[in-house]
Amino acid sequence: MGSSQGSTTLSADVMSLVDTLPVLAKTLIAGGAAGAVAKTAVAPLERIKILLQTRTNDFRTLGVSQSLKKVLQCDGPLGFYKGNGASVIRIIPYAALHYMTYEVYRDWILENNLPLGSGPVVDLVAGSAAGGTAVLCTYPLDLARTKLAYQVSDARQSFRGGANGFYRQHTYSGIKEVLTMAYKEAGPRGLYRGIGPTLIGILPYAGLKFYIYEELKRHVPEEHQNSVKMHLPCGALAGLFGQTFTYPLDVVRRQMQVENLQPMTSDGSNNKRYKNTFDGLNTIVRTQGWRQLFAGLSINYIKIVPSVAIGFTVYESMKSWLRIPPRERSKPA
């Protein structure tokens, strides 16, 4: 009996503390929790996607199921989560900023009566701006996540021979070493290698994700607005459509992030670096074929549906638990 009363008192104290937090702080917490849960849930699929996108040695001709078996064989069960620590460390502030700035930008647009109406276009613009803000603030951690996920245990010899020459692959011990070496190699620019295609991709993707999600919600009866059964399908469809349009840019970003880990030519120099996003797109099509721009897309479909669906669901649930007041719903323009 005493234990029950104690837990009830603790719960009441926690909720009392939560009620004192500013709305923006609550939104940051809700967004961070949504990102961490969603990212961890699909971490194994995310790692396979990166290996396929970057044409990692021994993964170039493998399908999804074969790649999963290869990672299990080389790195064991924990190999599916290699780089997930960096991913979660990044996704918590990224998702927190993404959701929070979306709410801020959206409210600012509506309050200042900008010529965007009050319909879903507001969600599109606010979502795009929020995505860009979150990326700029957390990009170095995404770089670290990709480099760590790129490493496969049986490919860690100092040199490896092959038809295309040889290369030296450095093995990173953790996030700090990745960021330190990237900074030593190219200064602050090294920490933002691949930011171009990331921004070009995230602006329409983030905008479309929020736009489609809010547009789908608009057609759901009011009494079902907070239902998990509504959040899951709406979030899944939002992620599916948004990611499809921007996927080639994600491939360019990943390849730019691991260029210094790619095979060396016979004279010991690195392969040609992409000058910019469009050079990367053109070079990949010319040297690797247009299909490479969609490498890993099938597994991305498998990943993005639960990822975005879980993210929106946890976000909405956290907003309810944190007692964030419902905001004004967008009206059709």
Image (spheres, rainbow, N blue to C red):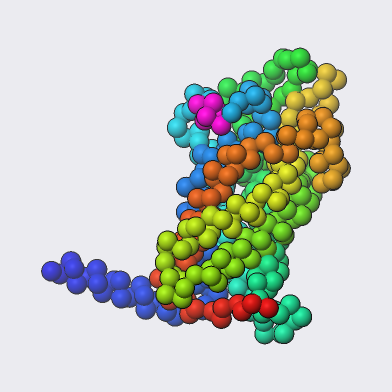
To which quarter of the image does residue 108 belong? bottom right
| Rendering coords of residue 202 (x, y %) | 70, 56
Q: Quadrant of the N terminus?
A: bottom left
Q: Is residue 184 left or right of residue 34?
A: right
Q: Residue at x 60, y 52 (%)?
A: 240
Q: Nearer the viewer, residue 244 or 42?
A: 244
Which residue appears farthest toward the left when viewing the image?
A: 1
Query: Is residue 54 shown in magenta?
Result: no
Q: Is residue 111 left or right of residue 33?
A: right
Q: Nearer the viewer, residue 111 or 8?
A: 111
Tell me which segment is drawn in magenta.
64-69
Q: Is residue 313 left or right of residue 151?
A: left
Q: Residue at x 60, y 77 (%)?
A: 330
Query: Is residue 67 shown in magenta?
Result: yes
Q: Compared with residue 306, is residue 265 higher up or lower down, i.e. above or below?
A: above
Q: Quadrant of the C terminus?
A: bottom right
| Rendering coords of residue 134 (x, y %) | 66, 61
- Residue 188 visible from this viewpoint: no
To which quarter of the image does residue 329 belong? bottom right
Q: Nearer the viewer, residue 281 or 156?
A: 281
Q: What's the magenta bit mostly, secondary-structure-wise?
A: helix
Q: Compared with residue 108, is residue 63 higher up or lower down, i.e. above or below?
A: above
Q: Compared with residue 214, is residue 78 higher up or lower down, i.e. above or below?
A: above
